[in-house]
Image (cartoon, rainbow, N blue to C red):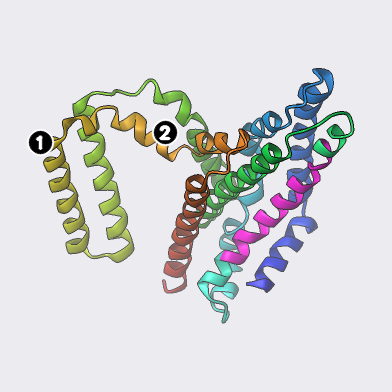
Amino acid sequence: MGAILIKELKSYFHSATAYIFMGVFLFFSGIFYALNNVIYASPDYASVLSSYNFVFLLIVPILTMKIFAEETKTRTDQLLLTSPQSIGGIVMGKFLAPVLLYAVTLLITVLYPLILSMFGSLSVKTIVCAYIGLFLMGSCFISIGVFVSSLTENVVSAAVGTFAILLCLWLVDSVTSTVPNSYKAGIVFAIAAVLIISLIIYNATKNIIVSAGVFLVGAIGIAVAAIEKKTLFEGLIAKSLGWISLIKRNDNFSMGILSVNSIVYFISFMFIFVYLTMRIIEKRRWS
């Protein structure tokens, strides 16, 4: 894993990727800092960090689009797949490289609150929590980008696909208030969710009996819940969208709340996409 990590970091700095990523991130962070803390003389730096959400839409696709897609296109991935490196080591090395570059870039922005502290008191706890939340959320976005890059050999497709998914996650909070909240809509949503889970299990195991069994158990569970507790399905879509929202979970950190539930969620989110990437690469190794 260490060799892969170093190789990926070198490739970032041997190309323009690292400089574009760091440049764009620091450019926007500087603008947000100047507008909020310098021009308006606000001591609230945590709100500046929460403004970085939009920047992720632009820079994460640039950072992750080549991770697997470029090697697949040039067929140099075969050298990697036939090496003694484990699939886990390959994927983790390629995932940790952009995360480390992101962490270093984020660390540079610590200069802003340090400068602010010279002119007044700051809530150190709130700022530290905001940085932790921002790092975890950014790492989740990177895990999505790495996964999408493993699905294609087209770098542009990887970037566009990552951007589309991140945009959907960014808009989740906006559409929550517009989705239907009826009992019937909740049931349809629950059935669709169980069906998607069953298809994912089938794709992973190629065992139709197991996937069909999961769907059957889920369908029975939905039927029982619909009879016993109808209120469970009222507003289910909005509740589910709110639960998966990375932006909403990051709001706790921006307010200085170190939420253990959100930390576990962010780590689990990363693990799921890293695991899915490992499955894709493992399938490619044996194909």
On residue 157, the disc is none
Q: In the image, is 57 to the left or to the right of 120? A: left
Query: Residue at the spot x=64%, y=46% of the render?
Result: 132
Looking at the rendering, the stretch of residues picked out in magenta corresponds to: 92-112
**Secondary structure beneath label 2:** helix
Kindly identify which residue carries mark 2: 242
In this view, the residue farthest toward the bottom is 84
Question: Contact (CB < 8 A) between labels 2 and 1?
Answer: no
Report the predominant secondary structure element of the magenta stretch. helix
For the image, the number of numbered tags is 2
Residue 107 x %, y %: 77, 48
Residue 33 x %, y %: 78, 29
Q: Quadrant of residue 10?
A: bottom right
Residue 95 x %, y %: 60, 59
Q: Quadrant of residue 41?
A: top right
Q: Mark 2 and mark 1: span between their CA atoms?
A: 25 Å
Magenta segment: does it hold 93? yes
Residue 94 x %, y %: 61, 62
* Residue type highlighted by circle 1: Ile
**Secondary structure beneath label 1:** helix
* Residue type highlighted by circle 2: Gly
Query: Residue at the spot x=73%, y=61% of the render?
Result: 9
Query: Residue at the spot x=51%, y=57% of the render?
Result: 150
Quarter holding the N terminus is: bottom right
The mark nearer the N terminus, 2 or 1, is 1
Examine the rendered structure and indicate whether residue 169 appears above or below residue 207: above
Badge 1 density bin: few <14, some 14–19, many ≥20, Cα 10 Å: few
User: Closest to the observer: 115 or 172?
Assistant: 115
User: Closest to the observer: 187 or 160?
Assistant: 187
Kindly identify which residue carries mark 1: 227
